[in-house]
């Protein structure tokens, strides 16, 4: 049975215009993204070849495109779009996407709001 290893891209930071409030969609803000991809890394371990694994630069580009080139009201929708694209593009068995929004317009103090979406094939 193949193992499920992980490729992790932690704390990618982008500026995007997502949110329910008009000012969020106009002014934009910082978003922090973590992605974990589950797959068998044995072929890449043996071959030492990029074609036997997932190209990190492509994962980063997909995440950047969703944050910077699209607008969503909800970070749930933003994370979901990333999950769908990553599952469609790569031969992975699972994906976890975590989106953190540090500047939440609430009447209180918090470090960030976040959603985490995980899917398996």
Image: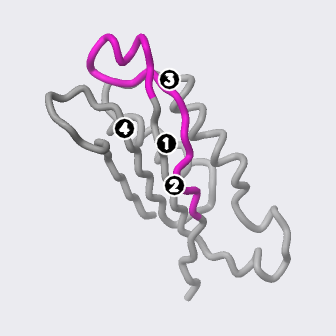
- For the residues labelled 2 and 1, say whether their Cβ atoms are less than 8 Å apart: yes
Q: Is residue 18 magenta?
A: yes
Above or below — where is 27 with respect to 13? above
Magenta range is: 8-29
Q: Residue furthest front?
A: 109
| Residue named by callout 3 | 70
Q: Residue at x 54, y 62 (%)?
A: 37
Q: Residue furthest bottom?
A: 1
Q: Residue at x 24, y 42 (%)?
A: 110
Counting residues from the start of the chain, the first of labels 3 and 1 encountered is 3
| Residue named by callout 2 | 35
| Residue named by callout 1 | 82
Label 2 CA crowd tier, 10 Å (few <14, some 14–19, many 20+): many
What is the CA distance from the residue labelled 3 to the residue labelled 4?
16 Å
What is the CA distance from the residue labelled 2 to the residue labelled 1?
9 Å
Query: In the visual, does 46 lie left or right of 53?
Result: right
Label 4 CA crowd tier, 10 Å (few <14, some 14–19, many 20+): some
Q: Residue at x 52, y 28 (%)?
A: 15
Screen quadrant of the C terminus:
bottom left
Counting residues from the start of the chain, the first of labels 2 and 1 encountered is 2
Q: Residue at x 40, y 42 (%)?
A: 80
Residue in front for this viewpoint, 100 or 89:
100
Query: In the visual, does 29 lie left or right of 65?
Result: left
């Amino acid at each position: 049975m193949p193992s499920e290893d992980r490729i992790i891209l932690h704390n990618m930071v982008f500026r995007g215009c997502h949110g329910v409030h008009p000012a969020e969609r106009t002014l934009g803000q910082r978003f922090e993204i973590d992605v974990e991809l589950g797959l068998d890394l044995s072929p890449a371990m043996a071959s030492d070849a990029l074609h036997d694994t997932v190209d990190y630069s492509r994962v980063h580009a997909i995440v950047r495109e969703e944050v910077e080139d699209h607008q969503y009201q909800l970070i749930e929708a933003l994370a979901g779009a990333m999950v769908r694209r990553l599952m469609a593009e790569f031969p992975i068995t699972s994906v976890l996407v975590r989106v953190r929004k540090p500047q939440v317009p609430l009447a209180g103090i918090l470090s960030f709001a976040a959603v985490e979406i995980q899917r398996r094939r």
